[in-house]
Image (cartoon, helix red, strand yellow):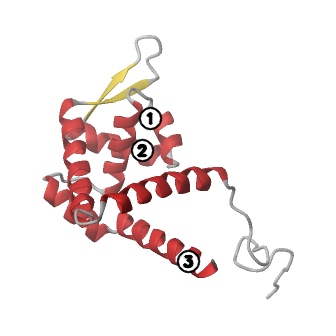
Amino acid sequence: MEGATDRVTAAIQTLFRLGGSRRIHQQQAAAAGVSLSQQALRALERIAETGLSTPGQLAAKMDLDPAVVTRLLRQLQEADLVTRVRSADDGRVSTVEITDAGREAFGRVREVIWDQVRRAISTWPEAELEALATLLSRLVTDVQREPYKAVGAPVGPVGTPAGLVTRP
């Protein structure tokens, strides 16, 4: 079973690498007619998913520094893809919401990605597609439930085994 498990893990890692590739992102963005960085597109996706949110909430969801999110929001706002409005209750707080243009731009990118996958699997038998859909859903559920665990010797903060101190 270890051989099949390793092949599944390697295939998933390859898909992640493809998803994070700048070259692939540039191809997707060009096909969609959208000129956004990977991080800006990721921010737009989170805003589209969550609806109205504050920059702080968005930073927490994206696990990014608030200053980075502020810069991304400025880019998205200048492109008219999001709006940023000060709270009527507390002027220190602003909320961010996707615009129709932002929703449409994100939709184009998503459609380019989904279309590419649809074409890649278009000749697969329906039974295999159903099995894949079922197994991928199960995998997502199981991965979300299973915590990460240390493998091998614990590693210290600079790549040395924990507990070992190196002195010059």
Which of discs 2 and 3 lies nearer the camera? The answer is 3
Q: Residue under circle 2?
A: 69
Name the residue located 22 percent from the left edge and 39 percent from the top edge: 78
Q: Quadrant of residue 79?
A: top left
- Looking at the image, residue 55 sits to the left or right of residue 156; the answer is left
Sequence order check, earlier mark of 2 and 3? 3
Q: Residues within 10 Å of mark 2 (few under 14, many from 20)?
A: many
- Label 2 element class: helix
Q: Marks 2 and 1: in contact by CB < 8 Å?
A: yes
Q: Residue under circle 3?
A: 4
- Looking at the image, residue 133 sits to the left or right of residue 113; the answer is right
- Label 3 element class: helix
- Label 1 element class: helix
Type of residue at label 3?
Answer: Ala
Q: Residues within 10 Å of mark 1 (few under 14, many from 20)?
A: many
Q: Is residue 18 above or below residue 60?
A: below
Sequence order check, earlier mark of 3 and 1? 3
Type of residue at label 2?
Answer: Val
> Which residue ends up furthest to the top in the rendered image?
89
